[in-house]
DNA sequence: CAAAATCTTGCAACATCTTCCAAAATCTTC
DNA sequence: GAAGATTTTGGAAGATGTTGCAAGATTTTG
């Protein structure tokens, strides 16, 4: 059998089974475990499959939930690290605005113990805290933007117009030296309102966001107080950003 | 079995059970308690599970399962029936206000196909629709009332003050001939605002609510257009309510 | 406060992974 | 088609990761 055919069959099998051991796969495609291992390496490179100890699992099974939920292991390690580092910046009993990005969601997960006051327009974040008594969570109104579970529209903007917070933890589609941008036009108005409502602005941006401008311009660099990113962020841009008096925290880089 | 698969199965089991002892889990995934302990450590790091003495509990239960749906399994059949019957009253493309009660949640589950416009202050209901494109869902703002996932406070009341709807589907703590009452004082203001905003008022009340007045009076019988209940509702009260020109629908007693 | 249960830590046995090598298959070139 | 180069394959040795157990520390219970 040809390598490609074998790999496709492995993929298909995993699609049905979700998990499979090496032996199982080796049996399935009638090749040695060594070959399967190699094939899995290729598929992992391709991004469809994730190798595990003793086998493999399919990477993106129908995740009908919010596009990120907890399944997306894509850059899970980095996002976890960013989340932890960013949560460390929040003092106890502060009022925090949480934006509706995937990275910010991980910040929220590490905030539980600080019993802060939280304001958010993200349903996933709201759900995270709905069972917990410690934190007071204000949800802005708005219309649900289907895929992401974000509340958008005038109700949301209005809500941010009425409040003041100590910190806003934001995310974005991309950052360059011209400023921060985002792809969802609907979110821009809301994010501007967030920035206006908070005294300190923290952006959580994983390394893939650097130097990648997105459709709509959100704000210039001058409004940013702190950026939290991961170790793979390009060093020259970090240096440049620090020249702009932005505190850049690289998570996981000790 | 591979670690990841085992961990996923632990997660899934916890999702159903909410709590589980180490032995239970060890049995479930066919591994030693030591291994389960280690797995739980990983899952806790990941943030989906919290370890406890002697076992573990799920951290943020799946979005469609707030405290009520897991707990109240005993009247599930009745609530399903009420939900179905009430959903049948809603026409296509109507604007519907959905209250935040356990019974109303079941109505929401049957509304999906009607592509209505929905306004709600219930997070479980919001989650229900967040993945679906068909319906437009407006979430009122507010502070999360922890256990129920309801949004309360002035933001919520305000939101209902600004809108108008065709129907309001409500729930309550009890109904008697003096009127409808509810136990959560915080909800009263919001429910009054809902009633004010809708042209037609439907109450979904399972049979246990009848003749059982609750702490705070919500409204008199005169504002009610329709009541949906189950077959166990006391016949004399149903008769009495019909005398008040209220349409009483007994679900499952076709 | 003591008994019982549970947790942590260290360890040895085991399974799996990586890296390398030789054989087989495939592709080039003539 | 044949000889040689290249790729692919299957396997073996050592490195690494995982598992289950047991002893001591810690927490819970009565």
Image (cartoon, coloured by chain):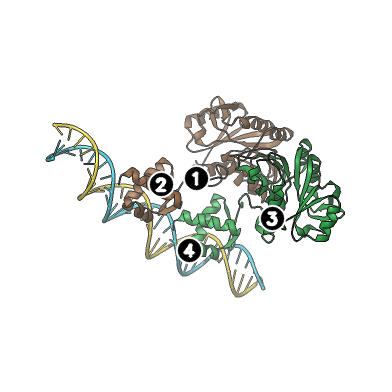
Chain colours: A brown, B green, C yellow, D cyan
Q: Secondary structure at mark 1?
A: loop
**Coordinates of residue A60 in the picture (x, y in percent):** 48, 45
Discs 3, 2: same chain: no
Badge 4 is on which residue?
B30
* Alpha carbon separation for disc pair 2 and 1: 18 Å
Quarter of the image where one finds residue A122: top right
* Alpha carbon separation for disc pair 4 and 3: 39 Å
**B217 left or right of A114 in image:** right
Quarter of the image where one finds residue B16: bottom right
Badge 3 is on which residue?
B81
Badge 1 is on which residue?
A73
Viewer-side label of 2, 1: 2
Q: Chain of mark 3?
A: B
Viewer-side label of 3, 1: 3
Q: Residue at x 51, y 65 (%)?
A: B27
* Alpha carbon separation for disc pair 4 and 1: 25 Å
Q: Residue at x 43, y 43 (%)?
A: A48
Disc 1 crowd rating (10 Å Cα; few below 14, some 14-19, many 20+) is some
Discs 2, 4: same chain: no
**B213 left or right of A180 in image:** right
Which quadrant is home to the C terminus of chain B?
A: bottom right
Q: Residue at x 79, y 40 (%)?
A: B197
């Amino acid at each position: 059998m040809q390598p490609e055919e074998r790999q496709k069959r492995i993929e298909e099998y995993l699609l049905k089974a979700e998990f499979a051991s090496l032996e199982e796969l080796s049996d399935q495609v009638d090749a040695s475990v060594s070959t399967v291992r190699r094939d899995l390496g290729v598929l992992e490179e391709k991004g469809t499959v994730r190798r595990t100890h003793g086998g493999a699992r399919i990477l993106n099974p129908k995740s009908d939930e919010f596009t990120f939920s907890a399944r997306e292991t894509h850059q899970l390690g980095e996002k976890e690290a960013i989340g932890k580092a960013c949560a460390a910046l929040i003092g106890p009993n502060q009022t925090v605005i949480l934006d509706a990005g995937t990275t910010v969601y991980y910040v929220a997960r590490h905030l539980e113990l600080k019993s802060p006051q939280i304001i958010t327009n993200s349903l996933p974040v709201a759900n995270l805290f709905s069972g917990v008594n410690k934190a007071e969570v204000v949800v802005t109104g708005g219309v649900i933007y289907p895929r992401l579970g974000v509340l958008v529209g005038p109700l949301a903007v209005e809500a941010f117009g009425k409040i003041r917070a100590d910190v806003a933890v934001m995310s974005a589609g991309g950052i360059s030296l011209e400023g921060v941008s985002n792809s969802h036009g609907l979110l821009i108005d809301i994010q501007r309102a967030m920035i206006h409502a908070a005294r300190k602005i923290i952006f959580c941006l994983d390394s893939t966001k650097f130097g990648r401008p997105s459709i709509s311009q959100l704000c210039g660099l001058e409004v940013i107080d702190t950026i939290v990113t991961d170790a793979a962020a390009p060093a020259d841009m970090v240096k440049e950003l620090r020249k702009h008096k932005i505190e850049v925290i690289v998570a996981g880089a000790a």
